[in-house]
Image (cartoon, rainbow, N blue to C red):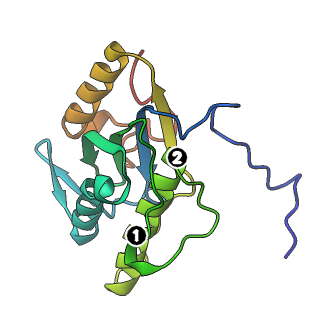
Amino acid sequence: MTRNPDKHRRRSIRLKDYDYSQAGAYFVTICTHRKECSLGDIREGNIELTAVGKIASKYWTEIPEHFIGAELDEFVVMPNHIHGIVMIKPVGVQNFEPLQHKYQHTISKSIGSIIRAYKSMVSHWCKANGHDRFRWQRNYYEHVIRNEDDLNEIREYIVNNPLKWDLDSENPQNARAHSRAPLHKK
């Protein structure tokens, strides 16, 4: 089947001319395919992770072990998405090669290479462990954190996210889920 550019238009959601491999702090949101709640459930403001959610959390915390210069700040695994802050330090980032195989088209030293490798590793684990239906949504959302106030506001948003699940636009049971609300107020 041939791709029809008029019908299948994909536009980049990245900042034009921004170098995503430069040192900085990045707020990242990664969603499951069709925003299926396959990572866990929220009960009384607390996340109860599924097996896939536990692996997603474990592999997230291991990112700095695979990327020199990458540091993690606040993060949360929600039922159908993950929010996290990744900081890239000036030393640079090395390619992440989990499970001893190479990833094609990975741009080294960028937030994109980190997220691509992370998603790939979770997906590989799922396929190897009987969770064949699990998939990530294409791409991810990112916000370049520009100052300390922005960083602190995002940290608070992440920490409080499970408590606000009933109001979250990513919650499929929320009546507002069809409208895309900003992830955090500025």
User: Which kind of residue does numbered mark 2 sit on?
Assistant: Ser
Crowding at dot 2, Cα within 10 Å, few <14 / some 14-19 / many 20+, comes out as many
Position of 49 compared to 181: left or right?
left
186 versus 176 height, above or below:
above
Residue 77 in picture, x, y percent from top left:
27, 51
Seen at 60% across and 54% down, the residue is 107
Q: What mark, if any, has residue 105 been given in the picture?
A: none
Q: What mark, if any, has residue 121 been given in the picture?
A: 1
Seen at 74% across and 49% down, the residue is 10
Residue 68 in picture, x, y percent from top left:
36, 51
Seen at 87% across and 71% down, the residue is 2
Q: Secondary structure at mark 2?
A: loop
Label 2 to label 1: alpha-carbon separation? 17 Å
Residue 79 in view (yes/no): no
User: Which kind of residue does numbered mark 1 sit on?
Assistant: Met
Q: Secondary structure at mark 1?
A: helix
Position of 53 compared to 185: left or right?
left
44 versus 179 height, above or below:
below
- The residue tagged 2 is 110
The disc, 2 or 1, on the residue closer to the chain's N-terminal end is: 2
